[in-house]
Amino acid sequence: MNPDTHPSGQLERLIDQALRDQPLLRAPATLEANVLAAVARVPASPWWRRGFLHWPVAARLGFLIASIGFIRIGLLAWERVSNTIGAVETTGIAAVAPGLSWAATVADLLSALNAVSRTLFAGVPRDWLYTGGAVMLSLYALLFGLGAMGYRVFRARR
Amino acid sequence: MRAYQDMVYSTAVRLTGSPAQAEDIAQEVFLKAYEHFAQLRTSAAAGGWLKTVATNLSLNHLSRYRRRWRLFSEMGSGNDDKDDSEPAYLAADTLTDAVFTTLDAEDRRQVVEAALAKLPEHQRVPLVLFHFEELPYEEIAAKLGVSLSKVKTDIHRARLQLARSLATRADELKPTSP
């Protein structure tokens, strides 16, 4: 028997009837006990381990105010750092902060390292860089593939 | 909970194809119901609410993993549609007879559940949403984020596969002529 050329309307009705006749599957006996155990654990968990919407109103307000404060502090810090960097660029670090002359040495060292790495990369053929990038992407994709296969074999088919 | 647990579990197991995942999802559904207990206790639509949540949680669960392994499994396999154009023929009344006369209810139940579990996810999910959840094609396409034509094709292929399984089982049970 082969239903492949079965007119699709009749096939739809046939399968619909067969599926609608299916009784419900019996839930495992452990389900009810697991749900009740999980429900019993819910009140024991403190408010900060629940979702934000379940926090007390005062805690939600405090969290929002603290968040805004942190954002303000971050913006101020960024402004201060930007000003300091601008001053260093125009007058030199020794003029801005005399006690930080060692920082000028570190900056010189970093800029020397930057120059060396630029020279090294300039010497590497572009094809090698592209090939290296492609290999890295392939390994990344392979990692996902193995993860997906492991999931399907060891967990999804349980 | 006892009144609805089989319905919630059945919805999840038919969508995910995995009893273990379905049990986890059913547990999550009832925990959500517990959170909304005040509204659900007096609602006549509690069953519908539970079914919708079970469906959505199952789809969320599937989509969490679908993007990750679709590229490696479904596209790579592509062999679930290979029998689409087989030329052999079976008349409508013969198949109906095979399914509803030769097979008793218990046989049919077992064959259908086994065939459903074997269907690839991209066929099983729209089939279940259409026939069990009674969603229209358009809503299924929107829920799954695929085109309307793909939904129709996948459901049609899933029906064919189910019909093949039922017909094969009916053939096995048919008494051989002397």
Image (cartoon, rainbow, N blue to C red):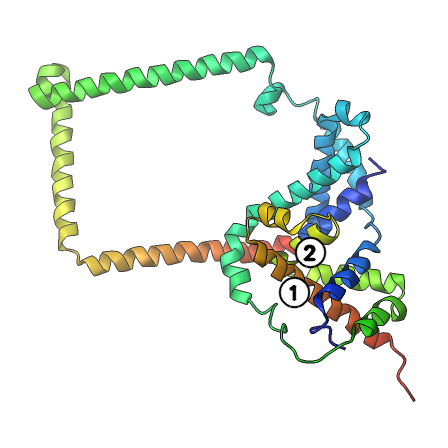
Residue occupying the point 57% across, 22% down: A52
Is residue B171 placed above or below B50 in the rendered structure?
below
- Say which residue label 1 marks: B157
Residue occupying the point 74% across, 53% down: B131
- Around disc 1, counting alpha carbons within 10 Å, would you say few (fewer than 14), some (14 to 19), or many (20 or more)? many
Residue occupying the point 40% across, 13% down: A69
The local secondary structure at tag 1 comes to helix
* Residue B145 appears left or right of B130: left
* Residue A140 appears left or right of B15: left
Whether the residues at callouts 2 and 1 have beta carbons within 8 Å, the answer is: no
Read off the chain for label 1.
Answer: B
Q: In the depicted view, which residue is nearer to us: B74 or B141?
A: B141
Amino acid on which the number 2 mark rests in the picture: Leu
Mark-to-mark CA distance, 2 and 1 = 9 Å
- Around disc 2, counting alpha carbons within 10 Å, would you say few (fewer than 14), some (14 to 19), or many (20 or more)? many
- Residue A94 location in percent, x, y? 9, 18
Q: In the depicted view, which residue is nearer to us: B117 or A104?
A: B117
Can residue B154 be seen here? The reply is yes
Q: Return the mark for residue A40.
A: none
Q: Return the mark for residue B127.
A: 2
Q: Residue furthest right?
A: B178
The local secondary structure at tag 2 comes to helix
